[in-house]
Image: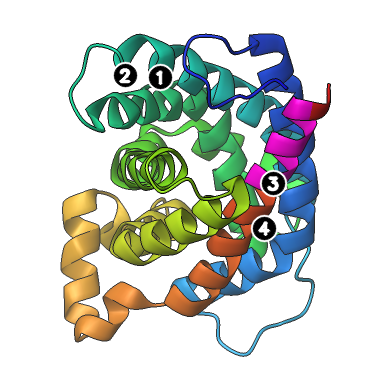
Amino acid sequence: MFDWHEIGSTSLSKTAMCAAVSSTITKTVLFPVDTIKARIQYGTRGSYSNLFRGLVPKILMYAPYQSVYMTTYTVARDQFVPILPGSLGFAAAGICAELAGSVIRVPMETVKQRMQTGSIENLRSLIKSDFSIVFHQRNFIAQTLVHDIPFGIVHWQVYEKLKREKNLSAGTAGAVAGTITAITTIPCDVIKTRMITRGHTEAEYRSVRSAIRALRQEGGARVWVKGWLPRVMHIAPSSALYMIIFDTLYKAI
């Protein structure tokens, strides 16, 4: 039986296909929870209508994104793990995957979160207003450097350790890794959400430093964990479901 977790013997074509299918199913099922989290962090309370707003750009871009992400992670993992001590190889592979995937993920997340929070009504209104904001360098900083890279480092180290050393199933390891990563990186997620959804209209969110200053002034430690519960409720099952589908497909074909 083929196993994606076996270092050095993985198929990149199978990895890409399994990643695309797994991500499409997972993101569609759990998208409403992600929308609720984004609205809480943005500052929109009590708004639970149109929870699938932003799903179309997410699905259209997430399948190719995951294909790029997982194949990059696989190649980097197989190269780094044999030469780096401990779990550093998995951390390094996670960084490579996040950087490679950022080409697709940054514009995808910018459009998705602006639609989720109501910053834009639809893709047509975004194009009419200023489509250049999708590719703004601040979005790369907020999405990739502030959020994605820390997320990738924590998630893959935890997941691989649980799967390889504790011999947990892909789904269980994914759920635990998703939970731990979601909780430990929630401040990064809050900063990222504010910068992407507000960073081009409100001066206090136009850089990481100014965003941190604005969040401090907003008051207390609670601001740094806004949306933590829906974030965990989204990422933990998302990671579990994704890895279950991915692992099952990879072994079946």
Let me know if residue 249 is in the magenta part.
yes
In percent of width and height, residue 9 lies at 56, 9
Residue in view at x 49 percent, y 9 percent: 8
Q: In front here: 138 or 83?
A: 83
Q: Mark 1 points at which residue?
A: 77
Q: Name the residue under label 2.
A: 81
Q: Count every numbered label the image shows and give the total.
A: 4
Q: Which amino acid does label 2 sit on?
A: Val
Is label 1 or label 4 in front? Answer: 1
Determine the CA span between mark 2 and mark 1: 6 Å
Q: Which amino acid does label 4 sit on?
A: Met
Let me know if residue 38 is in the magenta part.
no
Residue in view at x 73 percent, y 22 percent: 1
Judge from the rendering whether residue 246 lies leftward or rightward of residue 134; answer left or right.
right
Instruction: Say which element carries label 4.
Output: helix
Judge from the rendering whether residue 34 lies leftward or rightward of residue 106; answer left or right.
right
Contact between labelled residues 4 and 1, with CB atoms less than 8 Å apart: no
Contact between labelled residues 1 and 2, with CB atoms less than 8 Å apart: yes
Q: Name the residue under label 4.
A: 115
Identify the main secondary structure in magenta. Answer: helix
The magenta stretch is: 243-251
